[in-house]
Amino acid sequence: MPDIGRKITALLAAAGLWAYAPACGPSVVTLGARGGGLADGAGAGTAAAVSGASGATAGDGAAPIGQAAAGGAGSGAAAASGAGSQPNIEDDAGVMAPPDASRPATGPEPSRGCGTQPPASDTSVTRNGSTASYIVDLASGYDRNRPYPLVISFRGANVTAAAFRSYFDLPAVVGADGIVVNMDCADGAGSWDLQRDLPLFDALLEKLESTYCIDQRRVFAVGHATGAIFANSLACMRTPVLRGLGSLSGASPIGMCAGQLAVWISQGNAEMSRTLGRADRDFWVQQNQCNANATAPVDPSPCREYADCATGYPVRYCEYDGNLDLPSFAASGVWSFLRSL
């Protein structure tokens, strides 16, 4: 575990809030419809939170990097101020090239895969000796000449991509309007590790864009619990290739981001990590230069959108009665937001 992970573990253990579930192996549970536990060992979706001057941290199972993230000083503080700094995580994969400044500023940007016949089978990608499996759900009535929005989805700890796909059921909501890919951790691991899984995300995105007809201006990351923590880190480290983020019971990125994304956040008000969800909200409100004191209700209830955000980078926050289980509006809410971008 990296030094920051050891420090976080020690802090949580000292506070009596650390819970551990195996990162790998057979301890994978199957989710029922709109319910079921998300991790074994520590119960159904164990989360831990510590607030104050030391920040806030959570993990809903195992906790290598990507399973723990620093928040602000309490629920009302953003993680940091200003833009231009990268997250405090070593990136062995390098930084993906930003979009070409000579490209048109509006309209879809077709990927290399437009016009090609999609493969009959496409289930895994390999890089740096590790392999990640994934599930592709093409738009119903897929047209190989139409650039589609792409949503890459990341499950929580100790849950298979297939189980999360069934639980979240995002492809059913997206239907004919986009492509949804549910990605798994490298080599079947139970939890996300940023240094291990980031290169695989890069490889997956490259492969998808060369295989399917994707609008490269509308690539989104959506994650739940520890998958949301991983997606938040991606949002900071891959800003040039991502347009928006859906963070479902997540936590703010470690450090600061160099750019902005449109962000949709859902957070239960009954779980221990509520402070982290609010810190996630405050981070992106500040990052996108929104007015933290002005919100308006938006569909679905109880969502609210912040005012005066940077043009094209709204922040929407939905705090519901519940815990780590997804609210009934999660899939429709996040997709309605993303498709509007």
Image (spheres, rainbow, N blue to C red):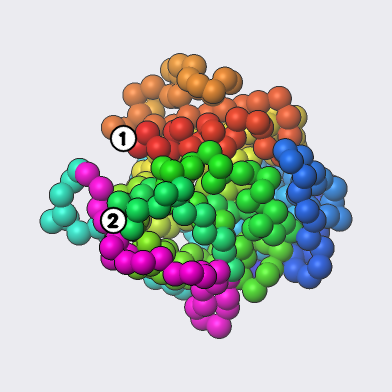
Q: Which mark is residue 145?
A: 2
* The quarter of the displayed image where residue 209 is located: bottom left
The x, y position of residue 21, in whole percent, is 80, 59
Q: Secondary structure at mark 1?
A: loop
The x, y position of residue 258, in whole percent, is 36, 51
Magenta residues (range): 107-132
Q: Nearer the viewer, residue 144 or 230?
A: 144
* The quarter of the displayed image where residue 310 is located: top left
The residue positioned 69% from the left and 59% from the top of the image is 160
Marks 1 and 2, Cα distance to the nearest angstrom? 26 Å
Q: Main secondary structure of the magenta part?
A: loop
Disc 2 residue type (three-letter): Asn
Q: Which residue is mark 1?
A: 312
Q: Relative to 335, is 228 on the left or the right? A: right
Instruction: Pick out the residue farthest to the left.
Output: 102
Q: Nearer the viewer, residue 151 or 80?
A: 151
State whether residue 38 appears in this view.
yes
